Image (cartoon, rainbow, N blue to C red):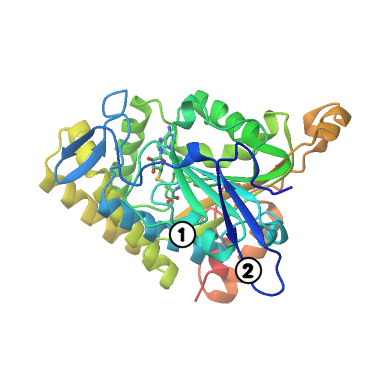
Amino acid sequence: MSPFSGRTTKESTNSKGSNSKQFKLVVEESTLEPKFPIGQYDYIDGRNFYRTEIKNNYLLPCDDEEVERLEVNHLLAKLLFGKLYFSPIEEQLKQGIRVLEVGTGPGWWLQDMAKDFPASHFTGTDIMFFPNNPPTNCHYRIADVSKGLPFADNTFDFVVQRDAMYRFSRTHWDFVLNELIRVAKPGAYLELVESSGTINDIGPNSSVWLMRLTVSLQTRNIHPKIAPQISQMVIDTGRVTDVVGSHRSIPIGWLGKLGDVALESMERLFDSMKPRLCEDWSMSSAKYDKVTQSASKEFRDFKSWSNFHYVSFRKMTDQERSETATPSSTTTLTPDDTDVESKDLRLKADSLKFTPKLLNNPHSCPLDMASNLP
Ligand SMILES: C[S@@+](CC[C@H](N)C(=O)[O-])C[C@H]1O[C@@H](n2cnc3c(N)ncnc32)[C@H](O)[C@@H]1O
């Protein structure tokens, strides 16, 4: 049976050369959506914002500059991790499976994956759409995941969500995780990739910006520091197994190319958030620019750094669920950081003549940062 069978309304064939079978792609008609943004938008300070149900609830815009910012972020994640995914599913992707990305934005990750794995079919969902030109094995559907995904239970072989930290309240997170798991097939892998929402070793201007941002997010009931908790949150659903979570550290503005890209990503984030934050803080555009320019300089001077977290896990099969007395007995959570890692880090850092700070902090850095040296 084709991995893409379902409500079949449209078919096409995809020949993959002499060694590969003829591939029948079946697409659900209902998943074909307009490529260009629909809905209502607000134009503020030169940027275009999707009008959310709760006024001004989402801090990030939807326009060409945001598409570019997300491309820089995507490049940063590729440089940092050296791969697009963490779960052991390469063979399945080559054979042809159904993949879902929730909150796909312009779809940089989705499109890279779609090009690498032409036999698989990729669906991206988002509350809004950015103009883009997706490959033919990739299509988009408008959906608000916090209200429920428009897919049947057990539909996808791989489900991914990346960079969702500015979107959800804690309650929404629990709901969203359960939705991601619901639409995954039993035995399917899922993955989440998130920035830690904190920046370490920062100067006074960066500190003020970050504190004020945290307040702006909290007034919207959004908790940006969710990343280190996600592994435990997915375990607590009691529906998954093989949970592997870890993180890598990113220098901002120092330590070579990775640091340069991270700084560019931060500067673009400053710009994207500027209209909403200036409104929130009753701050002039000129003052905001002054604070953020000083913050950029501080990142280099203070050798600031942040973490990107990922967690990969598998939805239990019915048999695994019935065999599991308590969910925690079947999950293996790889800790984010340990004394052993810190010791390794000290060794690596010593040899690099680089002094990592906060070595004893369990969420501290830089084992991986040291290995990020060009
Ligand atoms: C920071 S962008 C990340 C986009 C993409 N995942 C990436 O890594 O490039 C967050 C995306 O989440 C989308 N989003 C926000 N709230 C959402 C919701 N309730 N349901 C689905 N998508 C949402 C936004 O429209 C935006 O495209």
Disc 1 marks which residue?
Answer: 135
Q: Nearer the viewer, residue 131 or 235?
A: 131
Instruction: Nearest to the eye among marks 1 and 2: give it.
Output: 2
Q: Position of residue 249 (x, y in %)?
A: 52, 58
The verdict on label 2 being within 8 Å of ligand 1 is no
Q: Amino acid at mark 1?
A: Pro
Element under label 1? loop
Measured along the vertical axis of the image, is residue 226 above or below residue 267?
above
Give the residue displayed 13% in from the left and 45% down from the top.
285
Q: In 3D space, how far apart are the residues under numbered discs 1 and 2 (Cα atoms)?
A: 15 Å
Measured along the vertical axis of the image, is residue 370 above or below residue 169?
below
Disc 2 marks which residue?
Answer: 16
Viewer can see residue 356 = no
Measured along the vertical axis of the image, is residue 158 above or below residue 370?
above
Element under label 2? loop
Q: Quadrant of ligand 1?
A: top left
Give the side of residue 98 with respect to residue 21, left or right: left
